[in-house]
Image (cartoon, coloured by chain):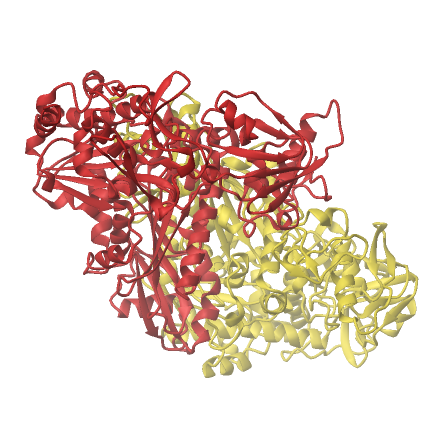
Chain colours: A yellow, B red
Amino acid sequence: MGRCVNHPERETNYKCMKHDVYLCDECLECREPELYCKYREECPIWFLSKGSKKLDEQTSAPEIQESCTVTFIPNNLSVEVPMGFTLLEAAREADIFINASCNGKGACGKCKLILNSGDVLKTETSLLSDTEKAKGYVLACQTQVRGSVSVTVPEETIARKLKVAGMGKAVTEKFQGLVSDICPMMEKICMDLAPPTLDDSISDLDRLRRGLSQKGVDTSRLSVGIEVMRELATTMRNENWRVTVSVMHKACSSEVVAVEPGDTTARSLGLAIDIGTTTIVVYLVDMLDGRILAATSGHNRQASCGDDVINRIVCAEKNGVKKLSALALSTINTLIKEAVDGAAANLNDIESIVVSGNTTMTHLLLKIEPRYIRREPYVPSISAFPVLKAGDIGLKGKPNAPVFIMPGPASYVGGDIVSGVLYAGLYHDEALTLFIDVGTNGEIVLGNRDWLICASCSAGPAFEGGGIRWGMRAEEGAIESVSIDRLSFEARLRVIGGYAPRGICGSGMIELISEMMLAGIIDQRGKFQLSADHPRMGAVGDDPAYILAYAGETAMGEDLVFTESDIDNLLRSKAAVYAGFTVLLNQVGLSFDMIERIIISGGFGQFLDIEKSVAIGFLPDIDRDRFHYLGNSSIGGAYMALLSDRHRDAANVICNAMTYLDFSSNINFMDEFVSAQFLPHTNMEQFPTIMKRLNEAAN
Amino acid sequence: MGRCVNHPERETNYKCMKHDVYLCDECLECREPELYCKYREECPIWFLSKGSKKLDEQTSAPEIQESCTVTFIPNNLSVEVPMGFTLLEAAREADIFINASCNGKGACGKCKLILNSGDVLKTETSLLSDTEKAKGYVLACQTQVRGSVSVTVPEETIARKLKVAGMGKAVTEKFQGLVSDICPMMEKICMDLAPPTLDDSISDLDRLRRGLSQKGVDTSRLSVGIEVMRELATTMRNENWRVTVSVMHKACSSEVVAVEPGDTTARSLGLAIDIGTTTIVVYLVDMLDGRILAATSGHNRQASCGDDVINRIVCAEKNGVKKLSALALSTINTLIKEAVDGAAANLNDIESIVVSGNTTMTHLLLKIEPRYIRREPYVPSISAFPVLKAGDIGLKGKPNAPVFIMPGPASYVGGDIVSGVLYAGLYHDEALTLFIDVGTNGEIVLGNRDWLICASCSAGPAFEGGGIRWGMRAEEGAIESVSIDRLSFEARLRVIGGYAPRGICGSGMIELISEMMLAGIIDQRGKFQLSADHPRMGAVGDDPAYILAYAGETAMGEDLVFTESDIDNLLRSKAAVYAGFTVLLNQVGLSFDMIERIIISGGFGQFLDIEKSVAIGFLPDIDRDRFHYLGNSSIGGAYMALLSDRHRDAANVICNAMTYLDFSSNINFMDEFVSAQFLPHTNMEQFPTIMKRLNEAAN
């Protein structure tokens, strides 16, 4: 036992094996050395944490821990880890992002590495083929190091740059027309105050109040924080009684958030932040004219704790919510720094922030207990957040900068959806609109300016690559578009970034299924109809598969196939979404043809082929010109709310107006779900244009 | 250079000479080991601070620092200090409180010690007599240790327990009748909430809001802090959805300050705190019935930085306001702990706090820049404080417990006076009242329910013992009452605690001057009339003196005398106060006989002989039954404000209503001041009863 070197008030068992230093849990888990972990700069995290945790667990039979060097090819990065670490843990220490959807459970089979040399201990797995095993493939999470090791990270295992929607120049230009009436959370007022005299010796704060009052600010309910009061005397005298006051207006009161010497009204920055489960996007905005000065995005570092929100909550229950918060903060703060550096701006000029994210993301960021989100009756702790302060949360910027968090009505319909609805304008249009955002969950909102109804339909991870043999996110190397020749059954592929393919992403899968169905390769139940000896047919064990790309054409030198099980998984996902549409419509007594507009949001939606989506029964068979792409609507709404109180108010109105329908115990949903597990649907009359094409194809 | 062991983000030069540890300024200066300074438990503060500061200053000629042991008799306490430390610094390290009004400048001559053995380096001083020097007396602040040293702390040098007004049982009983309509800053509401179901799955916070709304709380503008939100899910489920919510009501909104599991409405404590420049008083109050559960008081540890507010501000400018804040906090938190332990209560049940103190004390406590308080035009930084939180300030109790700070209208009329006016009831009575509080400054308030005018009249430190050869505070061993036989000129003394006298306090001085005047020992100019060969007459150098007690009768074995210079100093002090009365009355066109009530507040006032105070012209010559003692009115007002919003509102009303008159450049004040430097006054007609007595004595 010893005391944490950063927090001497805490006792801890975790001592570094190399140095005479103890660290507490929080320091061990934190990934932001700047914040907590000075000693971690000298000594890698694992050396302190797991090494000594093991030592601690083995107190009855102490044993000298040896460390092993793990070298990753082709990066040629080496890290030292204690014996017994898995290759996945070693990769994380080396900051190599590798695919591991199941978070090291040995369930997804995506964390494949090739063992070049060294002593390891492998757990048996059926997720590797005999061919793979023969080539030296191992699963990183199922392989412990027993000595120094060299491994190659294959193309398909590396988590690449995501194709992020809403980052291009065209999008930022579109955004900039959105808000004409800029009204930030903080009003900046520059004043020249009269210096005090013996006859006018009111306190500095009263002088400031008087000045504000003369500028038309209602000071009857003006509050001032202790940090502002502490420096007030110096600040006011610093530039000869010229000061700039930042005032935040609330419902019935105001707050002096900052006082700066001189005139700083010409400088004011804001941040719109979208915290996705996978990707975090940051926009740096000039609050004077709404210009987007920089946009940055990156992998949410929480990904090391699992791909989806459920895994993240489980991780928080096990390791503490602080760890997850620190990971998200570390990602966000890195992106903020990049954006500010990119725009040659100053962190301290960041004066207001809007954060949009799903309910789990916001809870984790703010260190709010998330465990009941995943337990029936699925209750979030907080739906609507008060305006917080950057410093209290841990975000870079002025410590007192107000932070508006997008409210979210339910555990599985969060602030990101409210933000999307705000951006899409549903709440002020008369047109009946269906808004969908498909990721791991498919969130759906139906309504118009008079009413809004919403639900989440547990689409599962198939569209993001989960449970699909060669499934992956829309990253570089992913097949995003497929067409199949009706005669030869040969496939023509489009791969993100123009690389050799290493997997297939959601939009690619939808096109693939649609093409296979229309070409007759599969029937309407999703079963293969092609002769097993056709050159495009293969199998994985007993599971028949269509060969999308031959071994020689792929990044990993192996056939890239899509199996019947993959098709089943995808059918379940698309059925869940379509069943969701149906139940929501039934709930309000409407039908698909009454929908005037379908808005497709999210990174996924951006690259979706509508015709093919309708063909497989993922989207309803209505006029194609009623479909609209919106890109990343979550960041769009955050940008709008950042610039205008009208939009912040609207976000709250939307959240309150949204009626949430829970599908988890809804019998209608189950019925509709079963009916929709067919291509395109059991009830073919719902898909007249597809029925016609299928008939044409058959004739 | 190294990094602070408690704050690794800070670089610092201060390395312990014994240990391989660095500490930053804040840690070095803090006197509360619990808060910052784990390493200080192992190693005394000086060893880290001054020792290494010296090392640092001497980098050009480095030199091995030796440490010396200083032993204090009769306590037999030893401390180790680096060579070159003064005995005063050593005494502070040993936590021995010794008199040092001038804060180590070598000006007051009060920090006398007797050197028993050891090597020291003395600075020449005229403040010690040859007799004293012969006996081994040294001034602690003017003596550096050069080796191990043994010193005796004489009786007169030890800072004893103050006679604190307002701590007795009678006073607390009187207090308890004051507030009939208890209305604390926090309302506690216990609720049994309906557990969530799939059909009622609103967020935890919304459930709490709904519950509060059903209990009649207006939740439309209810805010909730991030700390409360973080634990909300757990807290609400902990006692099966029974919770107690603490709500703070503000002008137009409310705040959820705490949520606790179960029903805690039966437990609620509050603190009334009076931060005096010299003494801090803490009352622990049961907020349910207003009972005072415990009362504690102690020396303000800031005293090590000087006796009066000016010295404290100078010290803050030199060493940083954080140091002064830490010293006050350390004193207060020790007293809070003592009070809570004494009442067998729980720190975490402290749910509201009221702090009363002069403007300098509140600025220093809250770490607000104080430097302009002492610079013309004497502007405080903050007059009226927002309600703060215990945790933000550093006070023990619930971290979110609201803290109401008594507002103060001016730099030299502070919250303690507003608190006194509240307690005295001036602001709701019709009777014209003069309120005085005499300490280092004499603060005066004149008025009634229609108007209030106030001033501070720089009485100087004489009444508290400053500038008076044997002057001291009203501590044990102080002469507090004197009568002189009209024929023999022998003195009869009353000493606090019944000890052998070691000095004379303010009330004793007033009685002494009055008695000497009426006995004809001095004339009305304060000059000695007694023959130099009278056994009671002595001298200090050329300065004639009256011998109050002979060497054999005193604690220090030396004549206790009062010199002509002492008389001059006291005359100036009493003249300043009386001139203050006169100018305030003139300002509003009133005269002394129109005053219906004179309220004497403060520790000093409690023990004052009215008749003798009038005789020397310190108090006006009006009907004696118009004079009222009030004891410590500052804590009285704090107690009232703690229990009732009506009184908190009244404090703000009083502060705003008080018109402050600045005497520093007031010509009338100077004239009146000169006229009042006479016994009792140049204009004898203002003192008819004294004139009559003097005439009788003369005949």
Residue A84, image quadrant: bottom right
The front one of A648 and B355 is B355
The one nearer the camera, B10 or A72, is B10
The image position of residue A10, as x and y in percent, is: 62, 58
Q: In this view, does A256 lie to the left or right of A64?
A: left
Residue drawn 71% across and 58% down? A478
B418 with respect to A271 (left or right): left
Residue A332, horizontal then vertical, whole percent? 59, 49
How many numbered marks have been drawn onto this rendered protein structure?
0
In this rendering, is residue A30 above or below B513? below
The residue sitting at 41% across, 66% down in the picture is B344
Question: Quadrant of the rendered structure where residue A485 is?
Answer: bottom right
* One can see residue B399 in this view: no
Residue ID at (69%, 69%): A102
Front position in the image: B250 or B688: B688
Residue A678 seen in render: yes
Residue nearer the viewer, B626 or B501: B501
* Residue B124 coordinates in the image, percent (x, y): 56, 20
- Looking at the image, residue B528 lies above or below residue A127: above
> Does residue A54 lie above or below A335 as drawn?
below
Quarter of the figure with the N terminus of chain A: bottom right
B440 horizontally vs B142: left or right: left
| Picture coordinates of residue B410, whole percent (x, y) | 28, 32
Which quadrant of the figure has residue A595?
Answer: bottom left
Q: Is residue A534 left or right of residue B689?
A: right
Q: For the C terminus of chain A, which image quadrant? A: bottom right
